[in-house]
Amino acid sequence: MNLTEILEQHNALLDLGREHLEKLSSSFREAFDKSAFENAKQNWIGFYHAIDWKTDRWISAVLVFHLVSLMCVVKWRHWEQFQVRMFVILGACSFGAERMNGFLSKRWEMFSTQNYFDERGAFVSVIWNAPLMVNLVIILVNFLRLTVKEMVKMKKAQMKRRFRESQKESGVGAKKKKTKRETKKKQ
């Protein structure tokens, strides 16, 4: 292979890459245009109207649970032990969502007017898991914030300690304090 053949192959690969990138960017533009957001909005409105809010009160109770857990996570964000407990509890609730969907799909007539629990778990994912994931992400961000805060505090303490040690070693700042008698004598 000579240099011209290598350059031709290189240019062919660049053209192929450019072509794929243009196709990808056009598909992104199509996916995220205004009609896509309008379709998503219509799907949410359809989802809202598909639920019988008056007779299926349990759905409102689930949403209230999520709202209360979100308020607790935000209110007690400085209490690390509570945050850890909430993270474990909400994580376990999310982990058990698939089993919960299977269990509830067999017994939906006991508490609901229609079967919301399909085999794919779409309803459980939207009503149960999505709010849990939001809470878990908030807790994780809070953990990161608290960790960084503690790291900064530790680094400041370490720097102060090193500064004091260097002051002691160099003798700077090791001046003898004057007693009351010495200050009176000078006056």
Image (spheres, rainbow, N blue to C red):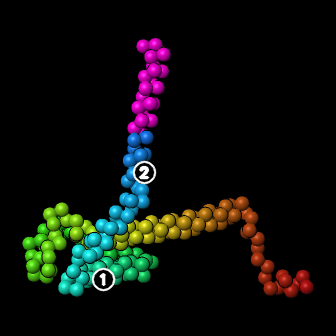
Name the image quarter holding residue 52.
bottom left
Residue at x-position 48% and y-position 16%:
4
- Using the image, tell me which numbered label, if any, was put on residue 64: 1
Pointer 1 local density, CA inside 10 Å: few below 14, some 14–19, many at least 20: few
Name the image quarter holding residue 8.
top left
* Residue 123 visible here: yes
The furthest residue to the top: 2
Residue at x-position 20% and y-position 82%:
56
Depth check, front residue: 73 or 47: 47
On screen, residue 3 versus residue 44, left or right, reads right
Q: Report if residue 14 lies within the magenta region.
A: yes
The quadrant in which the C terminus is found is: bottom right
Residue at x-position 43% and y-position 67%:
141
Residue at x-position 61% and y-position 63%:
159
Pointer 2 local density, CA inside 10 Å: few below 14, some 14–19, many at least 20: few
In magenta, the rendered stretch is: 1-21
Give residue 125's position: percent from left, percent from top.
Answer: 25, 67
Label 1 and label 2: CA atoms lie apart by: 37 Å
Give residue 59's position: percent from left, percent from top.
Answer: 24, 80
Residue holding disc 2: 29
Please tell me whether residue 126 is drawn above or below residue 57 in the rendered image.
Answer: above
Q: Main secondary structure of the magenta part?
A: helix
Give residue 168's position: percent from left, percent from top.
Answer: 68, 64
- Using the image, tell me which numbered label, if any, was put on residue 164: none
Depth check, front residue: 164 or 126: 126
On screen, residue 100 versus residue 26, left or right, reads left
Give, as a three-letter code, the residue at label 2: Arg
